[in-house]
Amino acid sequence: MRDDADVPAAPRPEPVRRVPLWRRILGNPWTQLLIAFTVTGLVLSLVAKPYLVPSSSMEDTLQPGDRVLVNRLAYVGAPPGVGDIVVFDADASWSTAEPEDRGLFASVLAWLGQVTGFGASGPHTLVKRIIGTPGQTVECCSDDGAVMVDGEPLDEPYVSSDFAFDPGVVDCTTLPQSDRCFRPIVVPPGSYLVLGDNRAISSDSAALCRVDASSEDCWRWATREGIVGKTVFILWPPGRWGVP
């Protein structure tokens, strides 16, 4: 007969370890997906965002279909400057086309593309180069056809095409005058005069003012509130990677 004292005691069950509630929440795939969307949204809204270049108005610097990275923090503590390429939301004076009704599914896809920057940009989102900042006087042209800012001609090697200008033949003193010409204008507070690098086809700040009979309110401005950020890099296509 065996003595019960010789029988090994049954092992005690391991205590059940309770997983803290916060770990269970963070470990949930839906929570992780929500966090990912939130972080992405914050980055796109506050730091940097890609944009699709919609037209040829900035050729050859930017090509239609280029996707550029816009730095939303570029003007924190420093104002936009002459020569900066900016993405901005145009106001009603630009007469940008309203989007057509494409149905719910297509509209959702378009919205996602605009929000993420990997689809078409919104109909009121434009990209141009700053030529004049608040308080500066801008006019065209100098004797040799250059844009003048505060009386000094701009050196603009980035301009790919411009309106015809031939001193003494077609310039700002001839009849008809060159379409390149526009009268002096002082840039209003909180506004920026923007032009395209492909100037002859760019619908920009001066587009409605390049005629003798233009009205005083022909100018269209990029506003400080409307500027999304500074274009700092070409993301796509790979063959065009680089700083514009």
Image (tube, rainbow, N blue to C red):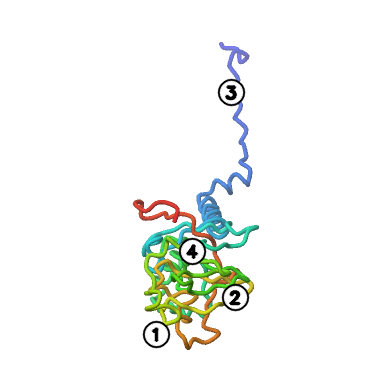
Q: Earlier in the sequence, mark 4 or mark 1?
A: 4
Q: Earlier in the sequence, mark 2 or mark 4?
A: 4
10 to the left or right of 233: right
**Circle 3/circle 2 CB separation < 8 Å:** no
Residue indicated by mark 2 = 186
Residue indicated by mark 4 = 115
- The residues bearing labels 3 and 1 have C-alpha atoms spaced at a distance of 107 Å
Badge 1: residue crowd in 10 Å (few <14, some 14–19, many ≥20): few
Residue indicated by mark 1 = 176
**Circle 3/circle 1 CB separation < 8 Å:** no
Residue under the image location 54 percent in, 61 percent down: 229
The residue sitting at the left extreme is: 239
As drawn, 169 above or below 66: below
- The residues bearing labels 2 and 4 have C-alpha atoms spaced at a distance of 35 Å
**Circle 2/circle 4 CB separation < 8 Å:** no
205 to the left or right of 109: right
Name the element at disc 4.
helix
Q: Which percent across, then down, holds residue 108? A: 43, 69
Which is in the foreground here, disc 2 or disc 4?
Answer: 2
- The residues bearing labels 2 and 1 have C-alpha atoms spaced at a distance of 25 Å
Q: Which percent across, then down, holds residue 16? A: 61, 36
The three-letter code of the residue at mark 3 reads Ala
Q: Earlier in the sequence, mark 3 or mark 2?
A: 3
Which is in the foreground here, disc 4 or disc 1?
Answer: 1
Residue indicated by mark 3 = 10
